[in-house]
Image (cartoon, helix red, strand yellow):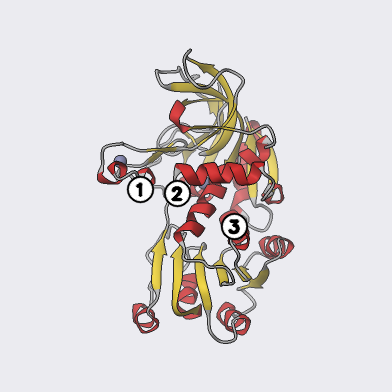
Amino acid sequence: MRAGLFLKANHVEEGELDKPTVREGEALLKVSLAGICGTDMMIYSGKHPRAKAPLAMGHEFCGVVEEVRAGSDFAPGDRVVVEPTISCGVCEACKAGQFHVCRTLQLIGIDKHGGFAEYVAVPLNRLHRIPDSLSDEQAALTEPLAVAIHTVRRSALQVGNSVVILGAGPIGLLIGMIAKLSGAQDILISDISPYRLAKAKELGFISVNAAEEDVVAATMALTGGKGADVVFEVAGTQSTAQQMVEMIKIQGQIVVVSVFKTPPAIDLAKMHFKEISLTTTRCYSSSDFTAAIQMMASGKIDLSTLISHQLELSEITYGFELMKNSEVSLKVLIKP
Ligand SMILES: [Zn+2]
Ligand SMILES: [Zn+2]
């Protein structure tokens, strides 16, 4: 079968893989759409600690059941979206029901072949049915939306709060959309990409270009000098790590969503004097995933505006080039 393969650092191209054979407890999916994510870009850059070439990446995907053993809840032809996390089931986190922080958590598309391929074999318990009212395009965004839902659920956000989001990529924008639905009053989003800031503005957020404007001063002006109630850090840079501490209000909460490639220097003394809470967040639980599907299917949230490109599998090299440039791309979907 055809697959988009990560072969070495900065090199992804169309190639061939053996079509997977279905084992007990699995279904074979014909992939409909698969999104390119920041994590895929980390693998592409050659810096991911676990991913090994050759690999069909892609952990944000939906498809149609092609083959499944009799007696399962699913049948050929069912439209499904994949919750890509695979937990061990025996570590202390798994025993406590916190499967998403499993000690040896693996992801389909990172630790094994994923959605940038014509077919993928997936454990049945990782499948979620796609309601008829939900398009494949939106269903392919379930995973990043689940990240945003999990992130906001991890925060102490309350109705009427002021929120700052550092980073206007797909995850930053999705967090803004969920924070708005959760009752946040003012939502300020910063970035250095005019393209992404225009998208933030279109979605109704206050957008600040950090290359031209002082984001901390803008936050202080917005909050009457108090600082933001909650700051979501979604950029993963030294400057945003510094800004988050300066713009947070006394006893406010910082939620670090980014996976920092290099450890930033953070002013812990400043955090001490303001008694700041710092929270991290990882992946999503199955209930976050289900909530994401329901929110989109019921029309509460429409993510189609985040899709900047839909490309054929043969164009996957171009797709990764597009993703390198935040001036021209947001969410790129591949159609295997
Ligand atoms: Zn992702
Ligand atoms: Zn585990």
Q: Name the residue under label 3.
A: 178
Question: Which comes sooner in the sequence, label 1 or label 3?
Answer: 1
- Mark 3 residue type: Ile
**Residue 205 seen from this side:** yes
- Furthest-bottom residue in this view: 225
Asked if marks 1 and 2 touch (Cβ < 8 Å), the reply is yes
Between 170 and 205, the residue placed more toward the observer is: 205
* Rendered location of residue 285, percent (x, y): 44, 45
Label 1, label 3: how many angstroms apart (C-alpha)? 22 Å
Instruction: Locate residue 282 relative to residue 40 in the image: left or right.
Output: left
Label 2: element kind:
loop
Residue 9 visible in the picture = no
Q: SS at mark 1? A: helix
Mark 1 surroundings: few (<14), some (14-19) or many (≥20) residues within 10 A? some
Report the label total: 3
Identify whether 42 is placed above or below 130.
below
Quadrant location of ligand 2?
A: top left
The label shown at residue 283 is 2
Check the picture and name the quadrant holding the C terminus.
top right
Instruction: Specify the quadrant of the image occupied by residue 92.
Output: top left
Rendering coords of residue 170 (x, y %): 60, 54
